[in-house]
Image (tube, grey):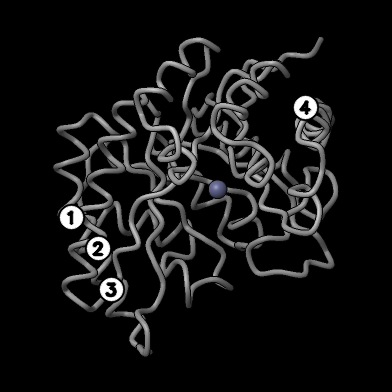
Amino acid sequence: MGDFSQLAINQFTTLHQWSLPEAVEGYARNGAHAMGIVRDKLHEVGVVEARRLLRTHEMQVTCLCVGGLLTDSDPHRFRANLADSRRAIDEAGELGAECLVFVAGGLPEGSRDLPAARARCLEGLAELLPYAKSAGVTLALEPLHPMICAFRSCLSTLGQANDWIEALGAGPELGIVIDVYHVWWDPDLEREIARAAGRVASFHICDWLMETTDLRLDRGMMGDGVIDIRRIRRLVEATGYDGYREVEIFSARNWWKRDPDEVVAIAKARYLSDVV
Ligand code: ZN
């Protein structure tokens, strides 16, 4: 038996195979006792039932995915997304999640004004932070790979996330998610991970396939691609982070089509291997 005390599995990894009850039961049966939860899946069963399942299977919640998407220039949609993020903060609090993952949002429809989208998002974040603080929930900024800047995240690098935290003068209610898939290519990675010391709320692992076929949904299993995951893990741990290593694989062409027990078993084997 290996040591799986720091293993977490994000529900996106078995998104198309397992409902939330199946995932909680399935991860626990396979020896994982921490997981990231996808809100759409949560809403299928509701928070009360989710809490019961988590208790029954002694499952910790790492992160709830996602809140944010606060770049809209239309004031009604902007307010609606703010309200939805407040609901997500409430849910994260009720689940005892370590953080709510915050995804910035891309360009509003028809817009080319990236600086405006970023400013809008910062404005929304400033408004959300007191709410997160009073709920005792950490909002965790997840910079996403620049290739999905247009439609998903105008927050693209760890350096930018560190800058936003400084600009907002935020307390511990604002953290950072380091996902190897999104940041591995960054020439400033070492410096910006060090700069995020004390702010790392979640650490996500998977791999970048050399022959990737999709901007978001073709992630690889650790060891199948080109990311030096172990190096990044060591950089993250050098900041003092000693939390979970969360397997998060979006994979429309491969892992979402496989037997989910097999996916978890392979993830566990790779987790123990020298690639992680
Ligand atoms: Zn992630």
How far from the left and from the top, in percent, is residue 175? 36, 42
- Foreground disc of the pair 3, 1: 3
Number of residues whose C-alpha sits closer than 10 Å to that of mark 2, classed few (under 14), some (14–19) or many (20 or more): some
Q: Amino acid at mark 4?
A: Lys
Which label was assigned to residue 72?
3
Tell me which numbered mark, 3 or 1, is placed earlier along the sequence: 3
- What element does badge 4 sit on? helix
Badge 2 vs badge 1, beta-carbon distance below 8 Å: yes
Q: Which residue has dot 1 on it?
A: 126
Residue drawn 72% across the image and 14% down it: 3
Q: Amino acid at mark 1?
A: Ala
Residue drawn 56% across the image and 32% down it: 238
Which label was assigned to residue 38?
none
For the residues labelled 3 and 1, the Cα–Cα distance comes to: 15 Å
How far from the left and from the top, in percent, is residue 126? 18, 55
Residue 271, above or below 106 = above
- What element does badge 3 sit on? loop
Residue at the outermost front position: 44
- What element does badge 2 sit on? helix
Q: Amino acid at mark 3?
A: Asp
Q: Which residue has dot 2 on it?
A: 122
Quick one: 27 or 155, which is closer to the camera? Answer: 27
Badge 3 vs badge 1, beta-carbon distance below 8 Å: no
| Left or right: 13 as drawn, with respect to 136 | right
Residue drawn 59% across the image and 18% down it: 33
For the residues labelled 4 and 2, the Cα–Cα distance comes to: 38 Å
For the residues labelled 2 and 3, the Cα–Cα distance comes to: 12 Å
Tell me which numbered mark, 4 or 2, is placed earlier along the sequence: 2
Q: Which residue has dot 4 on it?
A: 268
- What element does badge 1 sit on? helix
Number of residues whose C-alpha sits closer than 10 Å to that of mark 4, classed few (under 14), some (14–19) or many (20 or more): many
